[in-house]
Amino acid sequence: MGKIFSTFLPLYTTTLLMLLGSGLLTTYVSLRLASEHVNGALIGSIIAANYIGLVIGGKVGHNLIARVGHIRAYVACAGIITASVVGHGLTDFIPLWVFLRLIIGLCMMCQYMVLESWLNDQAESSQRGMIFGLYMVATYLGLSGGQVILSLQTGFGVSTLLIVALCFALCLVPIALTTRTHVRPMTPAPMELGYFIHAIPKLLGTTMVTGMAIGAFYGLAPVYGSSKGFTTSQTGYFMSLTIFAGLVSQFPLSWLSDRFDRQRLLFIIAILFAVACVPLVVLPHLTFHWMIGIAFAASMMQFALYPLQVALANDQVAPERRVSLTACLLMAFGIGASIGPLVVGALMEPLGSNMLYLFFMLCALVIGGLSYVRALGPLPTTEVPLPHVVMPDSLATSPLGAALIPTLEEEVIQASMGGQAPDDEGESDEGAGDEEPSTGDAQENQQQK
């Protein structure tokens, strides 16, 4: 573990700084607009614009990285994000903020693709779980740390935006100084959306509903805290602990997912999520500590849904389709994450802040209902369920890297056919093996196509 940590320390440091700025910016924007009594629907539209940008960035990022390379693409996007963050402090014109959030989301997706494809390319198959586990630790620590910084701020002046800009500027340093620059070019994952709509329609539906809940959480949970009378410091602690709950839930979830039926486990977690939301819906006068405790439990269930859905979906499809599956799940999640803030923002304005957790409860019941229908009868699965790997809980950390890097697909296909992964010397031969492929390899590639 120590060798892995030291090898990938620049990428982990970059991830930590980037998510520190992103988490701080998201909460700051929501709280500042709430303090200025901006309409909830407008706040939701700003958050939705960020997720729409993330989805669009999946295609734009691939083209940019293929054209200029990983480091140049990352540097360019970090510069645009820094300028966009400063732009929030230059104007209060809300439509411009919507545009700036869309640009930030688009550029951040490009950054995620650089980091995750880089990690995938350099990771050996036997170490990928540990490498991405540490990556997720850096992600959650960054998101939680941003909320802690916010709790130390007073008011909503430009100083907070300057801290965000500093984080995005400093995240360039580890990437610029790293010597691990031999990353393979990216190839696009095929999109087989029609196939998956017919093969796993309910799983795509539950993934979209999960995206609706998580998108609404990141954007409107700060508004919820503000409406309950929380100070800026209390709102920061509330967000920090509820986001940290996502990290806490991943490790017991991994253990349970590898030992119990995942369909029934998804149903149980969804019902527990709905039950945990009930007190925050029906009890309007809870103390601050009780609210944090209940919201922490609800967030543990909430952030466990998407990783479990990813693992369950991969159990349902053939190995050669798993790369395409990742891209389709991301699309479903992104669509939901764009819709959720708009719906909840429109509901919170006339009906009150409790609509946030009522919305979560309804989403959980929908997921539970679809999962219960799935659990009534066995569905075709792979011969041996895939080991559960800690996965990103949202578009805040995207699985696009795994979908776009070709080496991962090759390893999955070879493992399913009983083949051996190429050794390190073969991989570092700068494509020599690609120039004169063997007859067997050519026939195998033709069969796969």
Image (cartoon, rainbow, N blue to C red):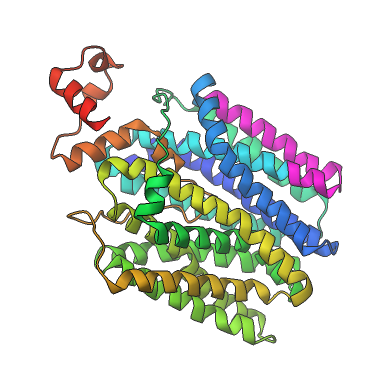
Q: Is residue 401 magenta?
A: no
Residue found at x 61% / y 74%: 357
Residue found at x 33% / y 48%: 130
- In this figure, what is the number of numbered marks? 0
Percent x, y of residue 179? 44, 24
Residue found at x 69% / y 51%: 25
Residue found at x 75% / y 76%: 351
- Residue 237 visible in the shown view: yes
Residues shaded magenta: 71-99
Percent x, y of residue 419? 14, 35
| Quarter of the image where the C terminus is located | top left
Percent x, y of residue 242? 56, 67
State left or right for residue 75 relative to residue 317. right
Q: Kindly report the secondary structure that dominates the magenta region of the rendered protein.
A: helix
- Residue 166 visible in the shown view: no
Relative to residue 272, is residue 242 depicted above or below? above
Q: Is residue 96 magenta?
A: yes
State left or right for residue 39 relative to residue 325. right
Most foreground residue, 148 or 436: 436
Most foreground residue, 321 or 165: 321
Relative to residue 57, is residue 272 depicted above or below? below
Q: Quadrant of residue 434?
A: top left
Percent x, y of residue 6? 39, 39
